[in-house]
Image (cartoon, rainbow, N blue to C red):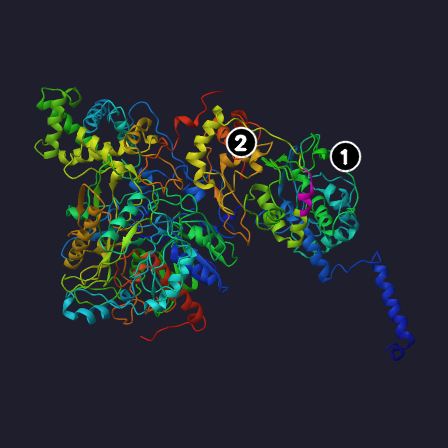
Amino acid sequence: MLEEKGIAGLLGSVAALWFAMMLSTRADASDPQEFTEIERGRYLAITSDCASCHTVPGGKPFAGGRPIETPFGNIVAPNITPDLETGIGAWSEEAFDAAVRKGVRPNGARLYPAMPYNAYTKMSRDDVDAIRAYLNSVDPVSNAVIANTLPFPFNIRATMRVWDELYFKAGEFKPDPAKSAEWNRGAFLVDGPAHCGACHTPKTFLGGDRTDQYLQGSYLQGWSAPDITNDKHTGLGEWSAEDVASYLKTGHNRISAATGPMAEAVSLSTSHMTDEDTRAIAAYLKSLPGKASIETPLPANSATMSAGNAIYRDQCSACHGIEGKGVARLFPSVAGSSMVRSNDPTTAIRIVLRGARSVGTRAEPTAPGMPSYGWQLDDGQVAAVLNYIRNSWGGAAPAIDAKDVSRVRSDTALRPD
Amino acid sequence: MDLSGPVKSHMPRKLPKKDVVIIGFGWTGAIMANELTDEGLEVIALERGPWRDAPTDFPPGYMQDELRYRVRHELFLRPDQMTFTFRNKIDQTALPIRSWGAFMPPNGVGGGGVHWNAEMWRFLPSDFVLKTHLTERYGKDFLPEDMTIQDWGITYDELEPHYDRFEYLCGTSGTAGNLNGKIQEGGNPFEGPRSRPYPTPAQAQPFSHTLFGKAARELGYKPFPQPSGNLSQAYTNPLGLQMGPCTYCGFCEWFGCSNYSKASPQTTILPYLIRKPNFSARDNSEVVKINVDRSGKHATGVTFVDTSGEEWEQPADLVILSAFSLFNVQLLLHSKIGVPYDPASNTGVIGRNYTHQTTSTVNGFFDHKKFNFNPFIASGAIGMCIDEFNGDNFDHGPHGFVGGGYVGQVQTGARPIESTLTPPGTPKWGAAWKSAVRDNYLSTVKPGTGVHGSSYAYRDVYLGLDPTYKDRFGRPLMQITMDLHDNEVKQNRFLTDKFAEIIKAMGADHVAKQYRTAPYDITQYQTTHVNGGAVMGVDPSTSALNRYLQSWDVPNLFVLGASAFPQNAGYNPTLTVGALAYWAAAAIREKYLKNPGRLVDA
Amino acid sequence: MLVFSATRVGAATISGQLPWTPNAGSSPSRIKLGSWEFFTGEEGRAMEAIADCVIPPDPETAGGREAGCAVFIDRQLAGPYGRQDGLYVRPPFLTGTKSQGSQSEAGPAQKYREALGSFDRACKSKYSGKAFADLSAAEQDTVLKGLESGDLKLDGADGKAFFEQAIKDIQMGFFADPIYGGNRDMVAWKMIGYPGARYNYLDWVNRHNERFPLPPVSMTGRAEWTSQAR
């Protein structure tokens, strides 16, 4: 009771409050050591998928050292544990925010957009502070990472100033009042923390987004990330919102399965999102217009289609079925798969050549694998069977030829995945 | 790899202790690992062979290679790595099995579960109390004097929930014959009561199998589809694992399944198990000894050898021996756990009651102008069968033998190297042979193990250690003394004749009977259903394990597998092997972990 | 994302995720056509002639020689099978009962070499210096029937066992996948109506007593897999 404590007590309380306010820079700041703040940061770190770059698989969390392949060479992700010498323990909150949302290091050097600051800019300061609070709570790891590994002239970070001028638009996410809360949440996640465009939006030769082809698919690290707009042939046009949400949550749905870099994104990030968030992303993606392209399938009796038909019947039908429908959540439906019909067939080709393991999650632990056929089929045969799969059962896609296959065969020959 | 001599270069290096060490990572090892990790225990499984999985080891691009996998046995253990010696009679010198013939031991993660037929049969209620049952019905003198059959120590009713559990784990395809005591049309009317129907419907039956069913029905029998672990439709098992429908490729037994449709540890357990942080496995690690303390009554862990020949010690509080029947017995002998069986004095338990399976077949040659069986379309557990002559399902009084088996057209494919038969009397080579092959391939019924009979135990059929031949570690090979007794020869003749009647009734022009006769031949394949040697029972003087598969001698050791069978019934053993593993796991979880020690007083 | 670490123990620890590496497993390799890898020229000629007796050519289907059965046997004997790789070959080698199986120290390759040498000598001594391949069809038939019955004895080899094994191996080569050298162009499979290395018969299991229409395919495909046009 104030009367009991007396005026001195009241002054003391006010002073304490004043001090607390001085410590935090903003009126609505949370205590960075508080459990809720750290939890919020942990979830944001998951949606931002920090671990996929900053944690070596099987290594210490966030200790950096993982090489990230870019068209310009390999970049090594730094140590973002709170270690004072080799991590970011000594950084201020301002410095951390500048790195995440503006792409600038404390010494003024610019980050390469392999760090997707052009997406993370959509997050708020509060979001970034929460991530910082979480990162501050993980084990500090002493691991000195040498960051400058790009060849000349890309190792001159000052050139990033030009890049930023062309491609970086700073600014937090602005919700669209005409759309639902769910849609806005989905848009925020896709363009912000989950930075889907980093892989799914095609790039200019300087590595900036081709914004006119937003989320229509792109090539990276030996894979082609598919179109995730609503195009009926190459995108999510045939998927329901539930199919999208299920894919993100479990890595599998009735049509397809996540493999390659997307398997990692599912495993580390999207499978840990809340159901509301995966549904929000689904709602947003399903609202995007498709290219509305009308493709004519290759004629069924053409030489490549006949050969592909024979190969398909003799081999692929073992799992993908005689009608191409596969088995739900076990073998993808090649008849229904938009990934298979991508304009850039790199992923389809490399899966046939080298095989692939789909992701295992808690909801879908099976993780079925596709065997490799590179030993059995020559380049022309791989092209034929893919042409058949891409152009049958109501599907249509441009023809692939043997040269496309040999390009992927030699490009992937030395890859570890 | 030749290690020439005992591996004793230095003391084995000790690894961090685990709660449980599992020796052998096949069906029973995987079942037990999954159960015990659910109790929060730290479990490690050690497997002598390599890791295996469908996309990398048996893909549909090259799995259909009869020469490589059936003729050259590529998925199986190499005799050079481990083998046994064999003789028919005690007064003969046992000689090494230099190349596999009568049975084919598995190797690798998944064990026999990778390349089995997936025929999933329950034993009859009377099979578990065989001695009591037969003595009551026929009198003690009806049984041969040297027959050493025993009761198991458990009943069918006790095992039923575990049969059910394993069937649902695998998604077994079948038609129930006895639902809670009510006989069901289309199923096996002789089976013990089951608490619920099969998880998926029976597989579709190809032409010749359907025709056999029709002929059997017309002769007054009650044919039913063989219960199959090659699934009739896509299935999600209780662990959330997805399986696909079997596509009748005809490359089942001897081969791994390429499209996730055959029940195996890989398709039903491992992807779920491997995600648990308290589980790990090592492949290419061969356990050479179970270590016991000075008292000899407590296991402290195991010693294993890696591919470099280095010895390691894996300490653990609980040891599960699940290395396949023969290797279980061999390891007990080498570890000096339990008293070795001596047939002369009829004392000791390790090695006694060794049995196999009494099989034979009848091939039918049909008019190719009237019959086209497309015999290459089949699964490993396809077939229409009858059970009228199994176990004690019929009165044996007039026949002078005990036991029996199912018979059926269970042809699993027609891979050409082995399935280009010609009618009796055809020359073995030349133009006549060639045209006979051409005219008969599509119209021959070749059931394989069409007659699948019991193998009862005898005093002079047993396992021991060989005095002469050594393995690559310098240890004695295990020695098998085995011959067919009159009882089984009579049983087989009876069943084969009955089977032949049905094949003839199908419309065959020629019927070629192949009886199983003595002497037991180590070069003729007759299933890998080898059992016994470390049997379960109620009496420690005639069994190695109590009714929970716990060693009488070493309470923190459980021994899983068909080595526990006191004798073999007229059915494939794996479903019973898996059910017993679940039964033992339940005993460990509900009783042993709360109070480690003997679960049954001696 | 593979968790497959080699620890201090010389074996891999598997935990967390199912192992995966691209191009894993061991795909089969086609035998190299060309000269004999095990047989001498004379041995090869003899085996081809025996193959043509065991599986004579006819207007519909090639015989054992043209189908490549001798090539099959040659490549098998030149490889791990011929050397008895993987079998238990420790001494002592004692003679046992028939039901105890082969106790011979000599593997298949050695047995063929000894038998073929002996067989050649036997033919030459019986037919004025002519090798088996140079005998008339009737003479070849007499020789092989003699081996089969045991009337024709070979010095230093078991003629009956040799011919039994040769029949088995020739017929095995005839029906194995063409990748191994025999069953060239899948002639044997075409003869009997076996569709080869297929996997999915779901649409045919309920079609009873109908001829399966698709041609055979081997592990390395069939002609229809390659587009005829560019």
Which residue does the image show at 26% across and 45% down from the upper left?
C88
Q: Amino acid at mark 1?
A: Ala
> Could you say which is closer to the camera, residue B339 or residue C142?
C142
Which residue does the image show at 28% across and 46% down from the upper left?
B211
Where is residue B345 shown, x and y percent of the image?
17, 67
Q: What residue occupies the far right of the structure in this picture?
A: A7
Where is residue B19 shown, x and y percent of the image?
46, 64
Q: Which residue is mark 2?
A: A391
> Could you say which is closer to the camera, residue B466 or residue A337?
A337
Q: Disc 1 versus disc 2: distance between alpha carbons?
A: 47 Å
> Could you say which is closer to the camera, residue A206 or residue B382?
B382
Q: Secondary structure at mark 1?
A: helix
Instruction: Report whether residue A378 is seen.
Output: no
N-term-proximal mark, 1 vs 2:
1
Q: Secondary structure at mark 2?
A: loop
Does residue B418 lie above or below C174 as drawn? below
Q: Are marks 1 and 2 on the same chain?
A: yes
Q: Which residue is mark 1?
A: A158
Q: Which region shows up in magenta?
A: A283-289
Q: Amino acid at mark 2?
A: Asn
Predominant SS along the magenta part: helix
